[in-house]
Amino acid sequence: MTERELVTRAKAGDQDAFEQLVLDNQNRVFSLTVRMTGDREEGADLAQEAFLKAWQGLPSFQGDSSFSTWVYRLATNVCIDHLRRQKRRREVEPALSLDDEESGWAEPADWEQDPQRCLERAELGRAVARGLEKLPDHHRRVLVLRELSGLSYQEIGEALGLDIGTVKSRIARSRTALKKILMADGNLFEAPASKTSKEKRGG
Amino acid sequence: MVRCEKFEIMLSARMDGALTGEEELALEDHLAHCPACRALAADLDALHAAFADLEEVPAPEGFAQGVMDQIRAQESQKPKVVPLFRRPQMRAAAGLAACALLCVGLYQAGILNGASGGSGQMSGAGYSAAGATAAPAGGYQSESEIDRAASGERSSPPELYQEEAAPQWDAADKQIVQAPDVLPAAGEKSGKCVDPKGADGAAGASDGSGETDGPRAYTAGSGGEVAGQGEANGAAANEIPPLDGMDAVSQMSGEGAADGAAPSEVDAEGASASSSSSEDGELWHRIGDRQVNAVLTMECLPQGAEEVLEGEPEWLPDGEGASFCLITGVEMEELMALAAAQELSCQATNRISGEQVCALRLTVLWELGEGGQN
C-alpha cells in the first residue's frame, strides 16, 4: 500500500494504516529527535509526540507534501518547542543547568542497545553521527536544524531566539568543531575529506 | 588567521546558500590565495555531504506500538461525537423551533389574510373595539358579505383586516383618489354607510387600472388573497367602519384604501388629513385614507413606545410626508404620558375614550412596518 493510500485510510480513522505510517517513518523521525536532544529517551518522547500530533492533525493534512515530509517537519517543531521549554527552565533554574559549552554529550548508557548495526554502515556517516553526539548541545542543535531539518538561518534564528549573524557564525563553528572531533576520533574523516580536498585542489 | 576565520564563516554560509554576491566574490578571491582555506572548504563540503548519508538511528523497540497505545487511549477518552442533528437535545430544540415557526406562520397568515381578528394589529384592535357588533370575520368574508357590510349592514369592519391582505397598492392608491368623489353620495345616503355602488365602480375601475405611483407596501382592500377582484376591493375600500357603535352618518368613504408606508407619494387629494363632526357631535378626523377619532402628532416615538404599541404597528402614509398608525385611545394616552415625561413634542387634536381610534402621526421618524419598505 502506498503512503498516499495509507494516509487516506488513516484520515478515515484507520488506526492500522496509521500504525504502518508510524513504522515507515519512525526511524527517520527518531533519528532527528534523538540527535536534536542528544538523549534517546527524550528523543523517543519527542518522536512519539510528533506522531501524536500527526494523528491529531491528520484531518487537516492536505497532502501538499508527502506524509514523511510533513511528519518530519512536525518532529522538528516538536524539537524546537522542547528546546524552548528547556531554555525557559534553565532560565528559571540556572543552578541546575550546566553551561552549554561545558556539557558535551556523553554517550548514553543505553546506546549499546542500538548502535552497531546502525552506525557501521558507512564509515563517514558513522563518524559524523558520533561526532554529532560529542558536539556541545548548542552546536549540535543548530547543525541538526540546518543539516537534518533543512531550516534556513532565519528559521533557526526564530526557533532558537538567535539573530541571524549568531546563527551563521554558530553553524560555521559547529562544523569546524565537528570536523575536529572526527579528525581526533581516528581520522575517519580524513580519508574522504582528503580525497575531496585533492579533487578540489586538483581542479 | 584572523582574516581566515572570517572566511571560515563565509565558507560555511556558502554551503547554505547564505552568501551575498559580494561576499561570494570576496571568498573566491581569498580561496585563490589561501591553501588552508581551500582545504577547509573541501572538508566542510565533505562533512556537509555526509549529513545526507547519515544513518538513521532505529527507533526503540515497540516504539510504534507505544504511539498507537497513546492514540487509542486518547481516542477512548474522547467523547463520542454524535452528529449535532442526532442529539436528543437538538431534536427537541428542532421540534420547538418547528412549533414556533408554525405559530409565527399562522400568526403571519392571520395578519395577511385578515383572519386573525384582534391579533394585536393596531388597526384591527382599534376598530373592532370601537363598536363592531358582529364577529370580525375579516378577510375570510365573501364578496357578498363585504357588499352587505358596505351597504350598511352592521357587520364587523372587514376591510380593516383586509387592508393587510396583499401588496397591490397601486389599485388602492387609485381608490384614495376616488374617495372624495364618493363623499357626497355617502352623505346623501341618509346617515347610513356610504353608497357602496359608487365606490364599487370607482374602486373597481381603479383596481384594474394598474400602475400608479404611490406608496409601496401592502395595501388595503385591494388584496388578491382576500378579495382579489376589483368589485370586492371596491366594496371593501368604501365600507366604513362603524365608529363607536353609532349609526355613522356622513362619514367619509374611501376607507380601507392604500395603506402603504412610504408616505410621500400618496395622492394628496385623497390623503390629507381633515376633520369634521358627525351629526351627533362625534368629532373625527381624516388622515390619509382613514378616519379616526383623534390625531396624535409626534416627531418621533418616545422611548418605551414599543411596549405601549403591542405588535408591529402598521405605518401608513398621511399624504403629507408623515406616517401614521392607528392606535387606541388607551395607547394614545400612554404615549402622551411617555412624551410628556421625555419632554417630546406631542400634539393631540382632542382626547378620546379608550376604545376609540386615534391616528398616531410621526412627522420626523417613523418606523417602517413589516410590509412598509418601498
Image (tube, coloured by chain):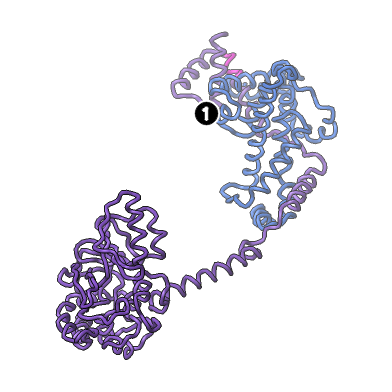
Q: Position of residue B67 (x, y in %)?
A: 76, 45
Query: In the displayed structure, would residue A12 be above or below residue B184?
Result: above
Which chain: blue? A
Q: Is residue A98 left or right of residue A147?
A: right
Specify whether residue A203 is in view: no
Which secondary structure lies at badge 1?
A: loop
Q: Is residue B309 left or right of residue B289?
A: right
Quadrant housing residue B81: bottom right
For the stretch drawn in magenta, what is the main secondary structure? helix
Q: Residue at x 50, y 70 (%)?
A: B101
Q: Residue at x 69, y 25 (%)?
A: A89
Q: Is residue A202 magenta?
A: no
Q: Which residue is mark 1?
A: B17
Tag count in the figure?
1
Q: Position of residue B202 (x, y in %)?
A: 18, 83
Return the chain for callout 1: B
Span colored in magenta: B35-40
The image quadrant where one finds the N terminus of chain B is: top right
Q: Could you tell me the amino acid type at mark 1?
A: Gly
Q: Residue furthest bottom?
A: B144
